[in-house]
Image (cartoon, rainbow, N blue to C red):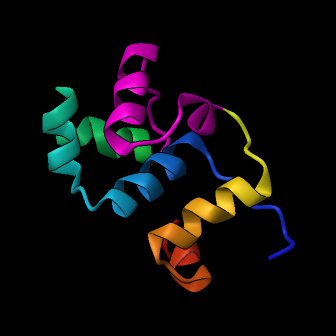
C-alpha cells in the first residue's frame, strides 16, 4: 500500500483496541474510566490526559509516540496488518 494513512488519535485507539481484542468496557475498566469516556476518545469528542493516554498505550501494547504522532507508513501498515482487518473494514470503522 503506497498511500499514506492518516488516523486521528481516537481512530488509533479504536484500531489498537480492536487489534488487542478488547471491548470498550474492558478497556474502560482496565484504565479506570467510563465506557462513554472511551467512546468519546475514539470519536474525537474529548482527548485523554497524558496519564490516561500513557495507560491506554501500555494496555494496548503500543508506544505512546505511535498514538501521538504520525508514524511512518510502514509502521502503521504493520499494525493494520496485525489487526487482520481489510482496507474496506478499516474504512467502514470510521
- Above or below: residue 18 compared with residue 34: below
Residue 2: name its quadrant. bottom right
Residue 31 image point, x, y percent: 22, 29
Residue 8 image point, x, y percent: 61, 46
**Residue range of the region highlighted in magenta in the rendering:** 43-68
Residue drawn at x 50%, y 68% as measured from the top left: 82
Residue 34 visible somewhere in the drawing: no
**For residue 45: magenta?**
yes
- Above or below: residue 78 compared with residue 1: above
**For residue 63: magenta?**
yes
Residue drawn at x 31%, y 37% as measured from the top left: 59
Front in this rendered view, residue 45 or 16: 16
- Above or below: residue 86 compared with residue 36: below
Left or right of residue 20: residue 27 = left
Residue 30 visible somewhere in the drawing: yes
Q: Quadrant of the image for the N terminus? A: bottom right
Residue drawn at x 42%, y 23% as measured from the top left: 54
Residue drawn at x 67%, y 64% as measured from the top left: 77
Q: Main secondary structure of the magenta part?
A: helix
Front in this rendered view, residue 10 or 78: 78
Residue 48 image point, x, y percent: 42, 25
Residue 6: name its quadrant. bottom right
Amino acid at each position: 500500500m503506497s498511500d499514506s494513512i492518516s488516523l486521528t488519535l481516537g481512530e488509533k485507539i479504536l484500531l489498537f483496541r480492536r487489534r488487542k481484542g478488547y471491548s470498550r468496557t474492558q478497556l474502560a475498566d482496565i484504565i479506570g474510566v467510563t465506557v462513554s469516556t472511551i467512546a468519546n476518545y475514539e470519536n474525537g469528542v474529548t482527548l485523554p490526559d497524558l496519564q490516561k493516554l500513557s495507560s491506554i498505550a501500555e494496555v494496548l501494547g503500543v508506544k505512546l509516540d505511535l498514538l501521538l504522532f504520525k508514524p511512518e507508513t510502514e509502521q502503521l501498515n504493520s499494525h493494520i496488518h496485525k489487526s487482520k482487518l481489510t482496507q474496506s473494514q478499516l474504512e467502514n470503522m470510521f
